[in-house]
Image (spheres, grey):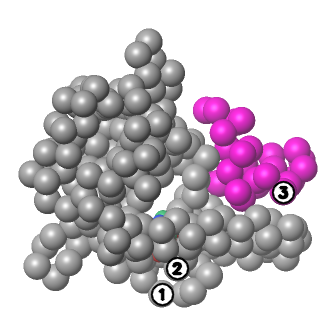
Amino acid sequence: MDDDIVRRAPLFTALDEEAAATLRQSMTEVSLGRAEELFAEGDQGDRLYVIVEGKVKLGRTSSDGRENLLAVLGPGEMFGELSLFDPGPRNATATSVGDTVLIGLGHEDLNPLLMAHPEVAQVLLQALARRLRRTNDSLADLVFSDVPGRVAKALLDLSTRFGRPADDGVLVAHELTQEELAQLVGASRETVNKALADFASRGWLRLEARAVVLMDVERLRRRAR
Ligand code: CMP
């Protein structure tokens, strides 16, 4: 297990080594294979999670069965805290994208932690505020940007989480199917595929199975604006 990644998670950053080790010991590890559901929208929530390895997608389903992805989170990121801060059912379904390892903290253990270390609450508020900003940006993009712009933005966002330097650019092994990518962008698979094919024909990126190599990040950034 990568302790450095855990240490950088919002829950841990404000703690000293001793308090972080105590917290880590009180958390239980969960391993998931590809596409396993951790919890579903509407479930009663009693744990929050930090991703140690892998990826988790957070999605919602409409009454007629269509799916929308709110986010794809990676190592060091946290989710499942909303049903604690605002008691109620889970706001989204959490599913592993590839093999994934998580550590979970029972909600009943979080309150004593926040009482003993109020500075942790400050970091968690910061993480929530950052997420609200991101959500507002996505909402504005849905209204104001076209699909290719949203695809470019989603790929750049995925690259900040999962990007690794490659010979000809930045390899983003997102592990998402084209359907999932479309759900993340909020458009049909056909329109998203067309945008990807167009970017590829311009030499801005190269498509691979469940991955993409961004070859001209600057052009993609301009297209995402
Ligand atoms: P909870 O409602 O307990 O379970 C689902 C979790 O998804 C929720 O807590 C948040 O942690 C997370 N979540 C909900 N909406 C978003 C969003 N827009 N972006 C990122 N994460 C989210």
Figure quadrant of residue 156: top left
Q: Is residue 96 visible?
A: no
Give residue 83's mark.
Answer: 2
Q: Which residues are magenta?
A: 1-28
Q: Which residue is mark 1?
A: 88
Of the residues under marks 1 and 2, which one precedes in the sequence?
Answer: 2
Q: Which residue is mark 3?
A: 14
Task: Based on the picture, tell me whether residue 103 belongs to the magenta stretch.
Answer: no
Amino acid type of the residue that numbered disc 3 sits on in the rendered structure? Ala
Of the residues under marks 1 and 3, which one precedes in the sequence?
Answer: 3
Question: From the Cβ of disc 1, is ligand 1 less than 8 Å away?
Answer: yes
Q: How many marks?
A: 3
* Residue contact at pointers 1 and 2, CB within 8 angstroms: yes
Amino acid type of the residue that numbered disc 2 sits on in the rendered structure? Ser
Q: Would you say the magenta stretch is mainly helix, strand or loop?
A: helix
Q: For this view, does 182 lie left or right of residue 16?
A: left
